[in-house]
Image (spheres, rainbow, N blue to C red):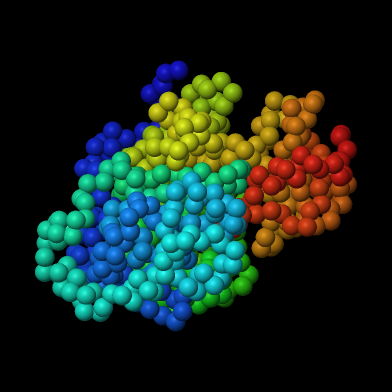
Amino acid sequence: MTDCEHNIVDMGYDKFSAKPELGEHLGAIVFRALARKPFKPLTVDLSTGRREMKSGVFLAAAIALSRRIAKIPVKRIGIVFPPGIACSLTNLAVVLADKTPVNLNFASGTKAVSICIRKAGLSHIITAQPVINKLPGFPWTDNTIDFAQLMGGIRKSEILGWLAAALGTPSNMLMRWLGIPTEGGEREAALLFSSGSTGEPKGIVLSHSNIISNCIQIDEVKMFRPETDIVMTNLPIFHSFGFTVNMWYPLVAVMKTVSLPNPLETRRIAQAIEDEKVSFLIGTPTLLRPYLKKVAPAQLRSLRLTVAGAEKPPAGFAQLWERTIGSRFAIGYGLTETSPAVAVDLDSVNSDKPSRFNENTGHLFPGMKARIVEDSTGEVIDPTSLGILELKGANVFGGYLDDAEATKRAFNGSWFRTGDIARFDEDGCLHIEGRISRFSKIAGEMVPHGTVEQAIVRALGLEDSEVPVVAVAGTSDKVKGESLVLLSAIDIDVALLREKLAAEGLPNLWIPRRIQRVDAIPTLASGKLDLMTLGEIAHKSADCEVESA
């Protein structure tokens, strides 16, 4: 199979890949950035009370902490923290010590965390006693280290000494003295784990080049205004958007953040936005929806921009957000394997024109290539056609941890197979239609589960629900290949549903054949649907069949 150049969307891949910064060390880049602006307010932590740190003090504390962490005789260090100063300090200190931070998903359950610990070969975890108290049953390792004890062993005079050194010594000279590498490139910089929505969590190895390139890409599209923006950072750091967009980019750009530990505390976050004059909010549609009902819009008037990712917003959500809240609204797209950001619809946001609300994710980030591939034949097709999105870029990871088979499946030659059904429009903007795992091939037609779910939500008037109450899954069908099963946490009148879906214009082929009543729709800690559990329930279902026309 050969690529036709006119079928490739190229955003300057070759030129970007040659940037010398991509060979640098993430810790060194952050070190220089913080040292250049030592008196700029860097972060406000509202976990308990209010604690603010300026860049220079933050760097000095990270240096002191890294000296302790460097003595730990292992390469990878587990980290269990909600977002906040302790989390960011620990991550930076681990990287400055030229070790790998492994932020563990403490919300994913004991079994999943145990798998991650085993796969990463973790023997040491850094956390805090209050976190330990809140996580009964968490599989802590024998070498679990209390952050407070680590920092408690560091005298204030030591931090002031490192601050003075950072102020008075050229950064490269001080880093050489401290033994902080300046070259990172393709070496392992971080290890994240997939959510495990379709099976066991997979270890996703991100290199220094991966993370640095994504920070550069975010900067080049002017997603943030580092000098003036104040960013709410409440997304968990064990998820890729929290990891890169909420933590590493603000450190690289020396941009002020305000952190709270729980993205579900809508009212508390709204109060923090008002008090701290936050201008930038990132979340998922699931996390953002409660703001429309629980928060007085006046509390959010400081917001300049809200970006939603991880899942496709319901139709009309962007319009409702801008009309109700007042901030501009953009849709973003990315995956953990792409470090994570790939595209954000900033075209209309960065202009004086009203938002277009055409629900695309904008142009690809600089330095990336994309193509659309027909799933069944592997043929590279016109980018305006619907098919599997494949990507290249310095931000694309190199493979899964100790899993050659999964890595082989994830790549088509040198192209990363995203597993997303997508297309580009005539303006070159990317439209994500859904995961291939969220499509069913019924009588030869690709049926998107998400579109069917949205039609059902509209038909039954469930738009205001703060949690999913319906979900669609596919199951095998001897005649049509696959059929749809509707899982519902509410009682549904089958005949009425069919009537309303038909009135919505939903094709008969797209109407679920069976309805399975469940106590609750299974979701992950991130709010995403638990696709593995959905599939298991669907295969066992046999409750109520919708009659064929």
Q: Is residue 406 above or below residue 543?
A: above
Q: Residue furthest bottom?
A: 49
Residue 268 location, x and y as percent?
53, 75
The N terminus sits in image quarter: top left
Q: Position of residue 515 (x, y in %)?
A: 82, 46
Viewed as shown, does residue 461 lie left or right of 525? Answer: right
Residue 317 in sight here: no
Q: Residue at 79% of width from left, 41% of height from top?
A: 540
Q: Residue furthest front?
A: 142
Q: Is residue 179 left or right of residue 96?
A: left
| Percent coordinates x, y for residue 157 in the rendering | 21, 79
**In the rendered view, would you say 124 is above or below 13?**
below
Q: Residue at x 75, y 32 (%)?
A: 476
Quadrant of res 16: top left
What residue is at 64 percent from the left and 49 percent from the top?
Answer: 530
Q: Count up the numbered dots.
A: 0
Which quadrant: the C terminus? top right
Res 470 seen here: yes
Q: Please report the residue visible at 60 percent of the width from the left and 57 percent of the height from the top.
A: 109
Residue situated in front as seen by the camera: 279 or 28: 28
Residue 70: image quadrant is bottom left
Front residue of 324/56: it is 56
Q: Nearer the viewer, residue 536 or 422?
A: 536
Residue 510 percent coordinates (x, y) = 74, 37
Q: Quadrant of residue 186?
A: top left
Q: Is residue 57 left or right of residue 311?
A: left
